[in-house]
Image (cartoon, grey):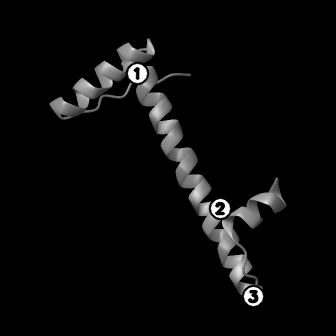
Amino acid sequence: MRNIVSISLPENLLKKVKRESKKENITSSELIRKTLNGYFFITEFRQIQQKALSEIKKKGLKLTDEEIFKRVS
């Protein structure tokens, strides 16, 4: 189900949205949806990352991001 939400944007940001959506050949709504999804993905990723780093620190381990990536891949 889709809902309609009204937002206000400064003129310069609206111009960027219109320019980018035209360049990507998508609607402004789709660009904003994709942008919000990306924002929430990154936010959730950072929360998980912080939790993992906290657990690693509690266990006295010292791992680099690369080492962690190798272990979870």
What amino acid is labelled 1 in the image? Ser
- Circle 2 sits on which residue? 48
Q: Secondary structure at mark 3?
A: loop
Number of the label disc, if any, that sits on residue 29: 1
The Cα–Cα distance between marks 3 and 2, rounded to whole angstroms, is: 18 Å
Q: Secondary structure at mark 1?
A: helix
Q: Residue at x 69, y 71 (%)?
A: 64
- Upstream in the sequence, badge 3 or badge 1? 1
- Circle 3 sits on which residue? 60
Q: Is residue 20 above or below residue 41?
A: above
Q: Residue at x 80, y 59 (%)?
A: 70
Q: Residues within 10 Å of mark 1 (few under 14, many from 20)?
A: few
Q: Looking at the picture, how far across and down is residue 14, in whole percent?
A: 24, 27
Q: Is residue 23 above or below residue 68?
A: above
What amino acid is labelled 3 in the image? Gly
Q: Looking at the picture, how far across and down is residue 68, in whole percent?
A: 75, 65
- Upstream in the sequence, badge 3 or badge 2? 2
Toward the viewer: 44 or 2? Answer: 44
**Left/right of residue 3 with respect to residue 62 in the rendered view:** left
Q: Residues within 10 Å of mark 2 (few under 14, many from 20)?
A: few
The Cα–Cα distance between marks 3 and 1, rounded to whole angstroms, is: 46 Å
Number of the label disc, if any, that sits on residue 58: none
- Upstream in the sequence, badge 1 or badge 2? 1
Q: Looking at the picture, how far across and down is residue 28, in whole percent?
A: 37, 20
**Left/right of residue 53 with respect to residue 59 in the rendered view:** left
